[in-house]
Image (cartoon, grey):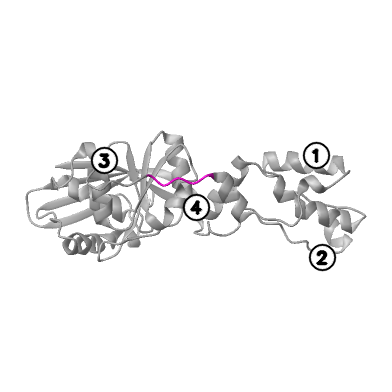
């Protein structure tokens, strides 16, 4: 039986869609993984087999071929463990294909079936939103991070059994919801605010334009105090879309618990160095 599931791979800090295909058929027991998998993905077969066995699920007993499409995209990290395991359950008749409709899933499995956190959950949720995917199943530890994207319904699973229960409807779990404004308020707390800077209208206008377009800024003032105040107030002028984009960049590095925006350091350079 052929099973098809939606997942995501990280290319740098961007998430790209990957289709996971699992085909279980009669024959000698063997599992073949194709689709340009890196070593971490090839090793996932052993993790998945033990996770299925330790949770009491039936493993494929014949010839099983797993394809990660597109074939020309390198796949690394362990985020494909969960979709491959669920694909095996569908291919062996333990889950129904329609139960996975509208879902994408990512997650790394431990040998006991625990779903471990992954990098880039927020980037994957943003990609799911852009692709029109309505539901995303992620590790429980990444659920609040991914739930910042309000257009996608996020479910968190602590282990493979919970993931199966959520998909089959046997486990009633409320989707995880997080307001971006609350997250921004928690992570971005400043002693001074951009609105507190009086005057300097040209400077403030230039910074807002640069922030809206994502440009870098070189600040050169004759009065050091003015430059310092405006520079430290600048991150508080960001809007929600900017915060989400900045958080997506840190999510790809596995640092989404760090402050969303960072104030750049002021380099002590001579005028000769500045002018080249």
**Prevalent SS, magenta region:** loop
Cα–Cα span, label 1 and label 2:
25 Å
Q: Does dot 4 land on a helix, a strand or a loop?
A: loop
Identify whether 182 is placed above or below 209: below
Q: Does dot 1 land on a helix, a strand or a loop?
A: helix
Residue 223 in view here: yes
Q: Residue at x 87, y 44 (%)?
A: 200
N-terminal label among 3 and 4: 4
Q: Residue at x 15, y 47 (%)?
A: 94
In the rendered structure, which segment of residues is drawn in magenta? 175-179
Cα–Cα span, label 1 and label 3:
49 Å
N-terminal label among 4 and 2: 4
Percent from the top left, x then y, of residue 38?
A: 35, 58
> What residue is pinned by disc 2?
268
> What residue is pinned by disc 3?
100
Q: Residue at x 15, y 60 (%)?
A: 56
Percent from the top left, x then y, of residue 146?
A: 45, 48
Residue 244, image quadrant: top right
Cα–Cα span, label 1 and label 4:
32 Å
Residue 176 counted in the magenta span: yes
> What residue is pinned by disc 4?
12
> What residue is pinned by disc 1?
205
Cα–Cα span, label 2 and label 3:
56 Å
User: Does residue 124 appear to the left or right of 38 in the view shown?
Assistant: right
N-terminal label among 2 and 3: 3
Depth order, front residue of 198/227: 198
User: For mark 2, does the 10 Å Cα neighbourhood hold few (<14), some (14 to 19), or many (20 or more) residues?
Assistant: few
Identify whether 170 is placed above or below 114: above
Q: Nearer the viewer, mark 1 or mark 2?
A: 1
Q: Are marks 4 and 2 in contact (CB under 8 Å)?
A: no
């Amino acid at each position: 039986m052929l099973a098809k599931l939606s997942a995501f791979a990280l290319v740098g800090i961007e998430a790209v869609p990957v289709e996971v295909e699992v085909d279980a058929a009669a024959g000698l027991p063997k599992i073949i993984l194709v689709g340009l998998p890196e070593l971490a993905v090839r090793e996932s077969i052993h993790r998945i087999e033990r996770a299925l066995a330790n949770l009491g699920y039936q493993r494929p007993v014949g010839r099983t071929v797993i394809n990660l499409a597109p074939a020309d995209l390198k796949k690394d990290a362990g985020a494909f463990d969960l979709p491959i395991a669920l694909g095996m359950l569908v291919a062996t008749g333990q889950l129904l294909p329609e139960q996975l409709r509208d879902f994408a899933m990512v997650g790394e499995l431990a040998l006991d079936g625990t779903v471990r956190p992954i990098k880039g959950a927020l980037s994957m949720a943003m990609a799911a939103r852009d692709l029109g995917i309505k539901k995303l199943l992620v590790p429980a530890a990444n659920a609040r991070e991914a739930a910042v994207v309000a257009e996608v319904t996020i479910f968190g699973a602590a282990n493979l059994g919970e993931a199966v229960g959520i998909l089959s409807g046997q486990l009633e779990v409320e989707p995880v919801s997080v307001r971006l404004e609350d997250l921004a308020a928690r992570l971005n707390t400043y002693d001074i605010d951009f609105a507190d800077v009086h005057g300097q209208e040209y400077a403030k206008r230039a910074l807002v334009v640069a922030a809206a377009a994502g440009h870098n800024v070189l600040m050169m003032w004759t009065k050091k105090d003015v430059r310092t105040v405006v520079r430290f107030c600048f991150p508080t002028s960001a809007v929600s879309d900017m915060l989400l984009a900045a958080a997506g960049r840190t999510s790809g590095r596995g640092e989404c618990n760090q402050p969303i925006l960072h104030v750049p350091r002021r380099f002590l350079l001579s005028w000769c160095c500045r002018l080249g």
